[in-house]
Amino acid sequence: MNKYLRPGKLIMLLLAVMLAVGAFAGMPLLRTWWKPQPVKKTVEDENPRYGEKEATILKELIAVYRRMDSIPVMETGGKIVATDPANPSDDLRTDFNYQRKNNLLYYQLGESEMVQLQDVNISTNKSVNRMFVTPPQTITTVAHLPVDSIIALWEDDSYAISTKEIDQQVTVSFLCEQHASCKELKITYNRASRKMNSMYMRLTNLSDPFNKALDRVVDITFNRWEEGKVNDSYFTLSRYLKKDGNSWLPAGAYSQYKLISTL
């Protein structure tokens, strides 16, 4: 199985999609994807203090993310390209599908799916014909941090910020070559529609953190973005499970899957 489709890497890539359509305030916490190891800096630099230009860039981007985070019903999809120069056999090119219907969520990445329904969580993987069923998890909504607090988080991460705009396509770039987990981040959105176009991350290879040639890259491109609509079939329990007495069995396209349940 491709390394990126193992559970840990799958979660990382799904987080990338969620971050691309979700809460901007959590972005500095990208370093938690890989446990940061102590990294000795060659030069001890003070964190830069952002001026009016950087603050203006961040405030607009925060507004874009807060708008997206407030959309109760939406679907989006596109492609993820993940490359690992240290392990080329683990490179990944695949489609993704993200759907949100209030508190119901659906993610699809390649042959893996995750869905959170009202009464159950379901994960499936076509390559191994497995279905995992667990009790529903409570989604805790994190209150929006004040804008100044979010800006302070980025300052603490020592990112240099720049932006460019072509035909209302705005790209905001964050760069910190000494960062313990994410050295570079680029977010592109449409200024008029406030919809995401792409997200690029260059992630530190902790086995050789100062070797730029070995940095991992995750590149997300959105080719579908619909607000106010979803494919309701993804949120129908009978799509995945059917009742058999007091037990559940995989249903429909999943009927040959092995069921692993903690219900």
Image (tube, grey):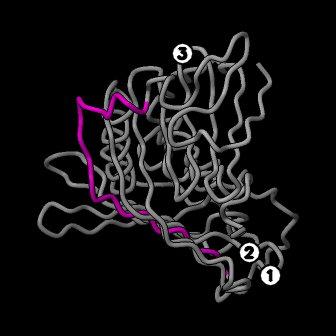
In the rendering, at what x and y percent does residue 83 appear? Answer: 59, 77
Q: Which residue is mark 1?
A: 208
In the image, 29 versus 92, the foreground residue is 92
Q: Are marks 3 and 2 in contact (CB under 8 Å)?
A: no
Q: Residues within 10 Å of mark 1 (few under 14, many from 20)?
A: few
In the image, 238 versus 140, the foreground residue is 238
Q: With 100 as the anchor, is 82 left or right in this view?
A: right
* Disc nearest the viewer among 3 and 2: 3
Query: In which quarter of the view is residue 39 placed?
Result: bottom right
Q: Residues within 10 Å of mark 3 (few under 14, many from 20)?
A: some
Q: Which tag, 1 or 3, sits closer to the chain's start? A: 3
Q: With 63 as the anchor, is 45 left or right in this view?
A: right
The single residue placed furthest to the top in the displayed view is: 246
Q: Which tag, 3 or 2, sits closer to the chain's start? A: 3
In the image, 49 versus 168, the foreground residue is 168
Query: In which quarter of the view is residue 184 placed?
Result: bottom right
Give the overall secondary structure of the magenta segment.
strand
In the rendering, at what x and y percent does residue 188 appear? Answer: 32, 61
Cα–Cα span, label 2 and label 1: 6 Å
Q: Which mark is residue 146?
A: none
State the quadrant of the C terminus.
Answer: top right
* Disc 3 secondary structure class: loop
Q: Which residue is mark 2?
A: 205
- 225, above or below 5, in the image: above
Query: Does residue 65 belong to the magenta stretch?
Result: no
* Disc 1 secondary structure class: loop
Seen at 50% across and 48% down, the residue is 108
Cα–Cα span, label 1 and label 3: 44 Å
Q: Are marks 2 and 1 in contact (CB under 8 Å)?
A: yes
Cα–Cα span, label 3 and label 2: 38 Å
Seen at 69% across and 71% down, the residue is 204
